[in-house]
Structures are given as structure tokens and as C-alpha cells.
Amino acid sequence: MEFQFEIVFWFCAALLAYVYIGYPLLVGILAKLFPQPAESPDREEPSVSIIISAYNEAPVIAAKIENSLALEFPADRLEVIVISDCSDDGTDEIVRSCAGLGVRLVRQNQRLGKSAALNYAVPQARGNILVFSDANALYQPDAIRHLVRHFSNPKVGYVVGNARYYKKSIESASAESEGLYWKLETYLKKKEAAFESVVGGDGAIYAIRKELFSPLRSTDINDFMNPLQIVDRGYRGLFEPAAISFEDTAESFEKEYRRKVRIVSRSFNALRRVPGVLNPFRNPRHWFLLISHKPLRWLAPFFLLIFFTASLFLWRLSLYRAALLLQLVFYAWAIAAWLIPGSRSVWRPMSLAYYFCLVNMASLIGCIMCFRGKLSATWTPPRQSLQSKD
């Protein structure tokens, strides 16, 4: 019996090591050894529609509109559309006041969620390229120009920009941990795009060809579903580090937890909706990137639980006893960070342990919600009050 538990122990250990260490190293090597041919995009600028999703964004929408209108892009080729998901805090009135500047409001009179709003707004967009953005994401002046230049390559279906966080956000333990996590994500995007395609988009800043937008279900997550659909149709996705947007992180670990539960549950469901991308023979490179970056990471909490259980059953053997004790110490740090006020800010390892556990708990709950079919069509941005529930 011990032999079987040893197999399980080492199998889970290998999977966890691959997810958090092996894959980042491997994709970096593959991107260097087997890169996709680089094509120099020309400078012809297409017509662009910036589509800003908004639900009760009165505190930030004026700054977002001002930022969008100040972008370094020909005014006759750029339109700004704000889609309001039945906002009731004055957001719509602020947008309407900017109508004379060329900003259009598209309002859903019933709160149906972001995906339904996109289905309604995209057919009304005049641009050949659609740039999707969040209301609190502010772009650098040249972001659009960098983002859309790659579409001169007919093989490119979507381009993901470089979302960053304001330095002032990195004051809380939550923001610092999320910032470290995002540095890893940025690295992976660069290497994935060099090897084949960046896996997924980013709701703050990503662009697609308008003709490649497919209608979404209300429970779909657009910045993951759209890229999957586009890859399934034979196109690539690139990452453009020079197309930079800035936004604040979630104010607390708890708000970040709710956001990640929603993302994982709806993203896992997207894989079921686009089964073609799970066929390794259609596009082996993208399949490898997708499975390594997303499902294996989402399933990591299950591996962690099995790994811990195997360690318990192998307690009497010194090697596994040491492994169990290390796990107990790590989880004790995370629990202490949860229970002791201010502890996350005092000692960084404790904060990181808590964030690691929180992210994996969110993945666990997100997976369970997806398997049980409990998906939410609407949500409240983490910067808003938690009184409104998904």
C-alpha cells in the first residue's frame, strides 16, 4: 500500500513542480529554440473601435474617456464606445455629456452581464479592429498604435497588451503579491507569443479583428473565450509589451479571491465550449501552451490536496515526514496571515504563503462551480462595494 502512495506522492510532486517551475522554464527554452518567424508589420493604420465595458463606473469613467480621446491615433480612424450594463450611478449621464466629443453610449436597459453587452455593442462598432478595455484601465498615448500594427499580418487574429499596476497600488500586501504574480504572467505571455500564441486575452487591453468576434453566451468570459475561438479558426495571438495600460489592483486579498473564482469557473467552462483547442493534433504548439498554462494550474489545488494526503499516509518514512512538516509550516504561515491583523504586511513570506493559498482556493472553488454548472453572468468590479453580489 505504501508503494502506491509513494507513486501518488511523486506524481503530484512532479505535476506541481512542472506547473510552477518547469513550464515557465520550458516555454522560455522553446521560444528561444523554435520561435515563430517574425514578420515586420507595416505602418498602415486600420480603423479602430475602443469598446469600454462599464457597470456603475461613475468615479472613473470621465478619466477613461479623457484618456481614450487623447490617444495618439488618427481621430478619423478611432471611435470610442462605452457599453453600460444598466448602470444606475450616473455613469451613463457622464458618457452622454461627452457625445459632442465623439463618444457613443450603448446601454443595456436590463443588467445581463458583460458578454451580453458585447453581443449588443460589437455589431454597432464601425472599426475593423476592436479594442476591448475596462473602465479603470488608462492607456499610454501610443498604446493603440502599438497594439494594432500587428494586424497587417493576416495570420494574426488578436493582440494582447501589457497591463501594469500603478506603483501607488503596491502599498498593500494584496497588491504586492498580485504584482509578483503578474510579472510571471507577463513573462509567460512574451514566451508563448514567441513560440506560438499567447494563451488568452486581458480585459484591460486586447484587440481582435471585428470579423472574428463570435456571439457569446451570458456566462462566457470574453477575454478567454474570444481568443480560444480565434485560435480554433486558425489564427495566432500575439503579445505587445509596448502597448501599455495602467490600473489599480484589488484593494484586498478577499476581493481578489472573488475575482479569481469568477475567472476560473468561466474560463474552465470556455474549454468545454471550444473543444477543438483541446485536440493536440490540430495545433500541437497551442495545445501544449494552453494545457500547461491554464487547466493544469487551475487543477493545482487538487494536486496539493492529494500530495498532502499521500504525505500523511507515508508519515512513518523520514523523507515523507519532512515533506509533511514543510507543508504544515507553509500552511500555518498562511493561516496566521489570515488570522493575525497586519501580519501580511510585516513579513513578506507570510503574505506570499497566504496569497498562494488564496489563489489555489479560488481555483478549487472555481473548478467546482464550473463542474456543477454554477456560472454567473454578471459581476461587480473588485474596486466597488462587495454589497452587490455576482
Image (cartoon, helix red, strand yellow):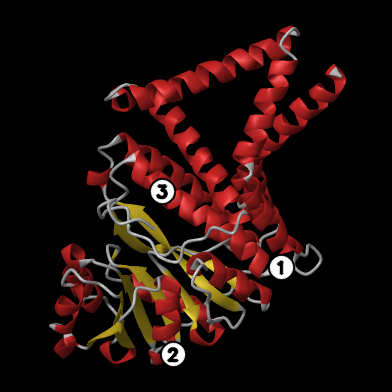
Front-most of residues 131 and 192: 131
Kind of element beneath mark 2? helix
**For the point 17% across and 63% down, which residue is it?**
59
Task: Please report the residue visible at 84 percent of the width from the left and 17 percent of the height from the top.
Answer: 2
Q: Quadrant of the C terminus?
A: bottom left
Amino acid type, callout 1? Pro
Residue at 73% across, 70% down: 276
Answer yes or no: do the residues labelled 2 and 3 have beta carbons within 8 Å? no
CB atoms of marks 1 and 2 within 8 Å = no
Residue 22 place in picture, x, y as percent:
66, 39
Q: Position of residue 325 (x, y in %)?
A: 59, 13
Q: Which-is-in-front pick, marks 3 and 1?
A: 3
On the image, numbered disc 3 is attached to which residue? 258
Determine whether the residue tagged by mark 3 lies in a helix, strand or loop: helix
Image quadrant occupied by the N terminus: top right
Whether residue 348 can be seen here: no
Mark 1 or mark 2, earlier in chain: 2
Q: Position of residue 193 (x, y in %)?
A: 58, 62
> What amino acid is labelled 3 in the image?
Arg
**Mark number displayed over residue 260:** none
Residue 222 vs residue 193, the one in the foreground: 222
The mark that comes first in sequence, 2 or 3, is 2
Identify the residue position indicated by label 1 in the image: 275
Estimate how packed mark 1 is, as few (under 14), some (14 to 19) or many (20 or more) residues with alpha carbons within 10 Å: few
Q: Is residue 30 above or below residue 11?
A: below
- Spatial CA span between label 3 and label 1: 27 Å
What residue is shown with label 2? Answer: 123
